[in-house]
Amino acid sequence: RRSSDLPALLLSVLRQMLPPGQGAAPAAAPLREMAVTRPTREAILGNVTLSMGHLARTADLLPLLQGLDAVQPLVGVAYEGKGSAASKNAAIALARMAKQPAMMERMRELHGIEIIYQYVRP
């Protein structure tokens, strides 16, 4: 795999783990349907959102993340997690993505700005 495939792969995992309506994949999501325990699920989401935050540090990857609509599943994780490590990591990734105006606008549409302020104090 090329390194540019990593964001798409991570977003695919996120979308499969989220409940429908929170940025989840529209098709059947095999990861969501697996008998994954809550701690394991939280660990997966925490690691994926942490990785997304690291990718969002790289300015060259922001247009790729925008094209993949990375904001939607991250907002879903941030709202679903209610204080978990995954939701905090998602908020940090969103804050980093907010540097790009188009992604900031997408966050506004999804009410993601509020979640950033809960975890990331300016």
Image: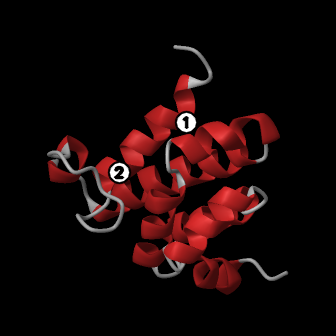
Q: Is residue 9 above or below residue 47?
A: above
Task: Name which quarter of the figure residue 89 lies in.
Answer: bottom right
**In the rendered image of this protein, does residue 60 appear above or below residue 4?**
below
In the rendered structure, which disc, 1 or 2, sits on the residue that comes first in sequence? 1
* Residue nearer the viewer, 79 or 61: 61
Q: Residue furthest top?
A: 1
Taking the spot 60% from the left edge, 24% from the top edge, the residue there is 4
Question: Distance between the Cα atoms at labels 1 and 2?
Answer: 12 Å
> Residue 35's spot in the image, x, y percent?
16, 52
Is residue 105 left or right of 82 when viewed as pictured? Answer: right
Please, which residue is most extreme toward the right here? 122
Q: Which mark is residue 15?
A: 2
Tell me residue 28's x, y (percent): 14, 46
Residue 84, image x and y in percent?
A: 51, 73
Residue at screen point 78% across, 47% down: 57
Camera sees residue 93? no
Q: Is residue 61 left or right of residue 22?
A: right
What residue did someone put label 1 on? 7
Q: Secondary structure at mark 1?
A: helix
Please name the amino acid that badge 1 sits on.
Answer: Pro
Q: Quadrant of the C terminus?
A: bottom right
Question: Can residue 115 be seen from the camera position used here?
Answer: yes
Q: Secondary structure at mark 2?
A: helix
Callout 2 amino acid: Arg
